Image (tube, rainbow, N blue to C red):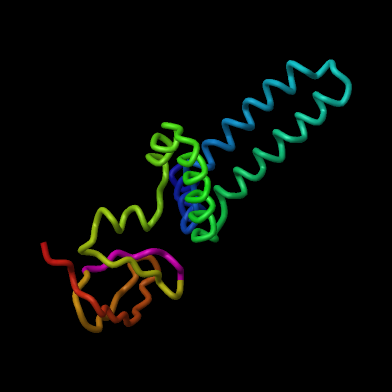
Amino acid sequence: MGKLLFRLGLMMRNRYGTDALYYALVLLSAVLMVFSFLLRRIRYVGMALTILWLIVLFYAFARFFSTNIEKRRRENESFLRLLGRYGNDVSSRLQDFSTGAAAVQKRDPDKKYVKCPKCKSTLRVPRQKGKHTVRCPRCDHRFQIRIIFGAKKK
């Protein structure tokens, strides 16, 4: 069982995962599924709703397993802006589900986040001015980074 969980963890590395748009799409899919089952006796309506909820659910899972993290983050930000425009309190609740390097960097300004050029994993290094050699703990690859601006003074 431990080996299976380890393999699953390796598969999910550098994947986008969940965010506010993912939860909204899954919720929309569930609502459409309920309506498709309630309206299944009406000709073509139940079938159309079934196809629609499957497409929405497929898109949610495609976003979940996506490796294009920056594009998924922009989609989520656009979705949250759209919700905020209509004055819903939902956008603030869904914002709590949002994850990503940008949110982490705001909480930890004394660190810099860099990607390993070999395995593409995200590394957190101290924000100290100058050139540094970084060793990736995942693949043991060593590479050089240059930090122009040091840690912010408090």
143 sits left or right of 148 in the view? right
57 sits left or right of 90 in the view? right
Residue lying at 37% horizontally and 57% vertically, measured from the top left? 102
Residue 124, located in which quarter of the rendered image?
Answer: bottom left
Residue lying at 29% horizontally and 76% vertically, measured from the top left? 134
Residue lying at 23% horizontally and 76% vertically, measured from the top left? 149
Q: Position of residue 42 (x, y in %)?
A: 85, 18
Range shown magenta: 119-126
Q: In the rendered image of this protein, does residue 10 appear above or below residue 18? A: below
Q: In the rendered image of this protein, does residue 100 appear above or below residue 120? A: above
Residue 109, located in which quarter of the rendered image?
Answer: bottom left
Q: Position of residue 73 (x, y in %)?
A: 48, 54
> If the image is split into quadrants, where does the C terminus sit?
bottom left
Farthest residue toward the left?
A: 154
Q: In the rendered image of this protein, does residue 72 appear above or below residue 148? A: above
8 sits left or right of 33 in the view? left
Farthest residue toward the right?
A: 43
User: What main secondary structure does the magenta stretch of the protein show?
Assistant: strand
Farthest residue toward the front?
A: 86
Q: Nearer the viewer, residue 56 or 123?
A: 56
Q: Nearer the viewer, residue 38 or 82?
A: 82
Residue lying at 68% horizontally and 27% vertically, measured from the top left? 32
Q: Position of residue 150 (x, y in %)?
A: 19, 74
Q: In the rendered image of this protein, does residue 136 appear above or below residue 93? A: below
Q: How many marks?
A: 0
In the rendered image, residue 120 lying in the magenta stretch gets the answer: yes
In the rendered image, residue 96 lying in the magenta stretch gets the answer: no
